[in-house]
Amino acid sequence: MTHIEDVVSCTADIVTVSPWELVADAARVMGDRNIGAVVVVDEEHQAVGVLSERDILRQFGRNPQTLAGMRVEEIMTANVISCSRGATLAHVNRLMVDKRIRHLPIVENGKPVAMVSSRDVMAHQLKAMEGMRDAADRMAKLLKCFKTLSVEEVLEAAASEVPNVFQAARFTMSFDDGKDSPALCRRGCPGSVEDLAVSAAGDGPVPVRRPVPDSCRRGGCSGECVLIPLTVPEGVHGHTCARPEMNFVCLCGWPSEEDLTPDQLQYKVALVQDILATTLYNAARFHETHRRSMIDALTGVWTRRALQARLHDEVQRSVRYRGPFCVAFLDVDHFKSVNDTLGHAAGDTVLRGLADILSEGTRTTDMVARYGGDEFVVLMPQTHLDECLLVINRLRERVVGELAHADGRPVTLSGGLAAWEGETREEDLLARADAALYQAKDAGRNRIVAAAPAAGRTESSSVS
């Protein structure tokens, strides 16, 4: 909220006259100083009245001849309406309108320290409106930058545009996006994120303006910073946000501290908080929805959608670097009859157990995905066909030895393998692996068939 001392200087010399001075002399002082009113003070410099242009003109209209020898005390407004330097601009404006006055002394301990005019108030309001309009235009530009739902790209767009809204040279934005460390974006800020987070959290969701933290000063910053907490609804990351203090914006490095008036600051902060909090909330929700679409809810392995994206990348990488990789199509033998006779809950137990064995028995660089129903795909980068056959056959043996259906029968697995042979379409590679899978089933199940190179034959592993 803007106070009157933010509008006029309370340290400059104030023009005063005594009650016994001639009105003509006072009018001459007002003309020389180009001011519309002066404060009338007694011997102890206590305010006893105000003499304005209106007082002089009113008397002139009544009897011009009497002004020549008239003293100030005869026509001044004796009932002084004043305010303190801590009065708000809104209070001063309302006082002027209610009392129909255009000049208001600022008085401390009975002594005038400044004079505020309706022109001062209006000029400040016009400047504030211009600043707010400029801020709104800049925020509209910022909104156009948020065409993505990537948290990282939202932060980059904010780092590009938000400092311009405040005319700040340095900027830091932190957002707890549910990872081990918060997403972070900086522009010229040397401060410790932890120091900034503690400062931002000190007043809850209310923006604060305070001296820059010690770590910033050691990095060469000085003056004040504005810390803007971002209130993002909890739970949008798939968990309860344990570090709300890490959601903040910090700005510093103003061209002039006086340019950042409280009203403009409050308006700009409200815009930034609303836009960034909403945008980050949407980005986090999108990220969580996207993550869930990539993880199979039943087994916890990747989904078919995630596999297709990874397989596309692997094909592109191999086309460029000619590196080998393989895919394995795996299927639980007689799974439909298991669901029909033992129930879907029993079938789900088998699928979860199979997913665990496949995940535990492959490398972190490999990818295990549930392709649909009881079908799984294992993608193995930088792997030749014979190496893939060895690993997948070992997994098949482990499934037989460790997994059993609800009626005690061992779970068996059939699979088809295919090595990349230069296909530019990932579906062609999957089709070869799928064809090999059907060969394994036709050959009696509980076996792995490796699709030989196009010019060769198809080989299968032995039945366990």
Image (cartoon, helix red, strand yellow):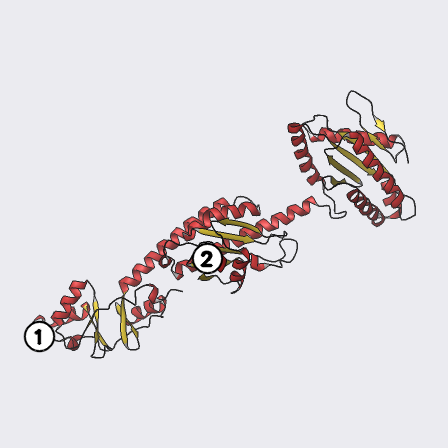
Q: Position of residue 453 (x, y in %)?
A: 78, 24
What is the quadrant of residue 225 in the picture? Answer: bottom left
Name the residue located 55 percent from the left edge and 58 percent from the top edge.
194
Find disc 2 in the rendering and name its residue.
217
Work out whether residue 332 can be spotted. Answer: no
Q: Nearer the viewer, residue 279 or 179?
A: 179
Classed neighbour count for the residue bearing mark 1: other residues with Cα under 10 Å, few (<14), some (14–19), many (≥20): few
Residue 67 visible at all: yes
Side of 312 relative to 195 (left or right): right
Residue farthest to the top, as pictured: 455
Quarter of the rendering occupied by the C terminus: top right
- In front: label 2 or label 1: 2
Q: Is residue 145 left or right of residue 51?
A: right
Label 2 with label 1: CB-CB less than 8 Å: no
Q: Cα distance, mark 2 to mark 1?
A: 63 Å
Residue 350 in picture, x, y percent from top left: 84, 46
Residue 41, percent across and down? 21, 76
Residue 383 occupies quadrant: top right
Decide which of 100, 202 is in the foreground and name it: 202
Position of 409 relative to 228 (above/below): above
Q: Is residue 71 above or below residue 253?
A: below
**Which kind of residue does numbered mark 2 sit on?**
Arg
Can you tell which mark lies on residue 224? Answer: none
- In the displayed image of the protein, which residue is found farthest to the left? 65
The residue that label 1 is drawn on is 69
Seen in the picture, residue 274 relative to 363 is either above or below; the reply is below
Secondary element under disc 1, as helix, strand or loop, is: helix
Question: Which label's residue is closer to the chain start, 2 or 1?
Answer: 1
Name the residue at 74% across, 44% down.
301
